[in-house]
Structures are given as C-alpha cells and as structure tokens.
Image: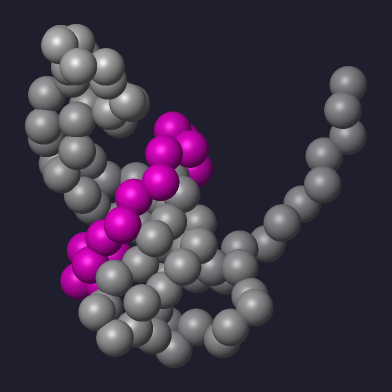
Amino acid sequence: MNIQDIPAGESWACRFRVTTFVDSEGAPVSTSLQPGEVHPGTPQLYEGIGIIQVRDTENRRVQLQDVDSLAVFTVNFEDTWDVDRVEWQETEDE
C-alpha cells in the first residue's frame, strides 16, 4: 500500500527514517530548549514506526507520531515504507 492510496478516516502506520537529535542510545530527544541551553543530543538518522496523523499528497509529506518516543515527525513519502493498517486493541487496566 502506498501512502497516497490510504483511504481517508482509517488508521495506518509505517516505518520511517528522519534526521533528528538523538541521545547516546539512539532515542529521539526533545528539542524544546530555552535560549542558551545546551542541546542534550546529536543529529543522527533515526528509524522508527509511526502512526500516520496527516498526509500532504500535494507536497508528498506525512506527519506521524513515533510509537516509541511519542515524538511527532514530518517526513517525505520517500522516507517511509511498510505501510500497514493499525488494529487498535483495548487493554484492561490492572
């Protein structure tokens, strides 16, 4: 399935890659800094799985939320692959 072919109103996810600031273990770090603060990460290529939130088919970009870090990224269609439908499941709270 290609991102541009996803039906509106359905939940889909994909693997993606983006250059972002990551910590020493390769996890994305927050970029919300105050003036003068030292950034805690270094720029590197990050790959993850993200829930698709918004598609811009005209500019071929997609906004998605990384399932591990919950960070939101905007990436080019070309930097996404393995597009698949999301199957939501409810879990019981313990």
In the picture, measured across the screen, residue 43 lies left or right of residue 22, that is: left
Instruction: Please state the horizontal and vertical placement of residue 7, each as a whole percent of the image.
Output: 56, 86
In the picture, measured across the screen, residue 30 lies left or right of residue 42, that is: right
| Magenta-highlighted residues | 67-81
Can residue 26 be seen?
no
In the picture, measured across the screen, residue 10 lies left or right of residue 52, that is: right
Quarter location, residue 42: top left
The residue positioned 88% from the left and 21% from the top of the image is: 94
Position of 31 relative to 16 (above/below) = above
The residue positioned 31% from the left and 57% from the top of the image is: 74
Number of numbered markers: 0
- Residue reaching furthest left? 43
Q: Nearer the viewer, residue 37 or 83?
A: 37
- Residue reaching furthest front? 35
The residue positioned 26% from the left and 60% from the top of the image is: 75
Instruction: Please state the horizontal and vertical placement of residue 34, each as a whole percent of the image.
Output: 27, 17
Position of 51 relative to 67 (above/below) = below
Residue 11 sits inside the magenta stretch: no
Position of 19 relative to 63 (above/below) = above
Q: Nearer the viewer, residue 21 or 82?
A: 21
Name the image quarter holding the N terminus.
bottom left
Instruction: Please state the horizontal and vertical placement of residue 85, each as a whole percent of the image.
Output: 57, 70
Residue 68 sits inside the magenta stretch: yes
